[in-house]
Image (cartoon, rainbow, N blue to C red):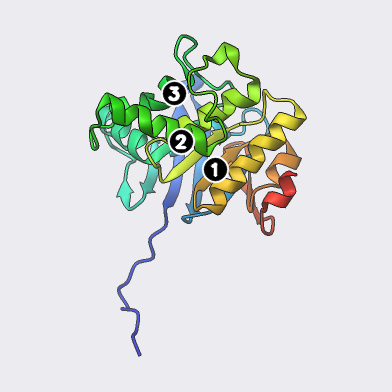
């Protein structure tokens, strides 16, 4: 019978220890995060909630390698990214993290396919030809139900369709994590539910998803909800199995 070595180290997809983020100095210093500790396992679907000023955006920016902590450590997929240079952070961000924003952040003059393939242009690890980039973008758009909208520009798409393009863009580099910041915030109820169904499908396929939301009914789609208040985690609870049935 095999045994686990006593020196084996459990490795999480994300491990944050004693995370502190301070903006400004002296009398105007603002402590946005006050010693956050958090682990995330591969394949989890987590909602992050909290009122304005709670620190959830700061936490997401650090988890997304858009910012660095003032103190503490952040280990992502076995690599401590806490003190990486901006250029190295950008490389990690492009390879391992897919972003979905409330406002979609699509380039208005580009087609859906060209918007989706943009992250591939900055992926030095896997240079592709123009044809390969386009083919991959089309395949990802088809996977989110937009195979017939490849050549449409953002102003020719509904809000829900634009968010699907944004999700396809987040998926194009096969990231370890999808960070979704209020992904249904600009959508009507029907379109919002459709986006949640899509996120559930991605989760069922193995995606790790961290989603910021202020809507309790949206948070219930996740398996786990983390509540932030004044820069600290005050609640971290399991919701039960987040399933696609919640989204229909």
- Name the quadrant containing residue 160: top right
Q: Is residue 42 left or right of residue 161?
A: left
Name the secondary structure under disc 2. helix
Q: Is residue 119 left or right of residue 209?
A: left
- Neighbourhood count class around disc 3 (C-alpha, 10 Å): few under 14, some 14–19, many 20 upward: many
Q: CA distance from mark 1 to mark 3?
A: 25 Å
Taking the view exactly as shown, the residue that stands out farthest to the front is 148
- Residue 50: x and y in percent read 66, 37
Mark closest to the chain's N terminus, 1 or 3: 3
- Neighbourhood count class around disc 2 (C-alpha, 10 Å): few under 14, some 14–19, many 20 upward: many
| Residue 63 visible in the snapshot | yes
Q: Which residue is mark 3?
A: 113
Q: Which residue is mark 2?
A: 140
- Residue 150: x and y in percent read 49, 23
What residue appears at the point 36 percent right and 27 percent down from the top-left corner? 134
Which mark, residue 210? 1
- In the image, 174 versus 213, the foreground residue is 174
Q: Is residue 113 left or right of residue 163?
A: left
Name the secondary structure under disc 3. helix
- In the image, 86 versus 240, the foreground residue is 240
Tag 2–tag 1 contact (CB < 8 Å): no
């Amino acid at each position: 019978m095999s045994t686990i070595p006593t020196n084996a180290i459990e490795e999480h997809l994300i491990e944050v220890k004693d995370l502190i983020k301070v903006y400004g100095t002296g009398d105007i210093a603002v402590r946005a995060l006050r010693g956050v500790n958090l682990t995330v396992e591969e394949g989890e679907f987590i909602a992050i909630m909290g009122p304005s000023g709670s620190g959830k955006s700061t936490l997401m920016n650090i988890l997304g390698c858009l910012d660095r902590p003032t103190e503490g450590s952040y280990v992502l997929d076995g690599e401590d990214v806490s003190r990486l240079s901006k250029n190295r952070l950008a490389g990690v961000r492009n390879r391992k993290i897919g972003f979905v924003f409330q406002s979609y952040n699509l380039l208005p003059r580009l087609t859906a396919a060209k918007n989706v393939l943009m992250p591939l242009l900055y992926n030095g690890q896997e240079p592709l030809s123009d044809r390969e980039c386009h083919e991959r973008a089309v395949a990802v758009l088809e996977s989110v139900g937009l195979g017939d909208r490849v050549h449409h520009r953002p102003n020719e798409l509904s809000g829900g369709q634009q968010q699907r393009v944004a999700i396809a863009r987040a998926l194009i580099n096969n990231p370890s994590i999808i960070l979704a910041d209020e992904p249904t915030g600009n959508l009507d109820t029907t379109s919002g539910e459709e986006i949640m169904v899509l996120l559930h499908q991605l989760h069922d396929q193995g995606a790790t998803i961290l989603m910021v939301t202020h809507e309790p009914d949206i948070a219930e789609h996740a398996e786990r909800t983390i509540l932030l208040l004044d820069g600290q985690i005050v609640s971290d609870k399991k919701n039960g199995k987040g399933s696609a049935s919640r989204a229909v």
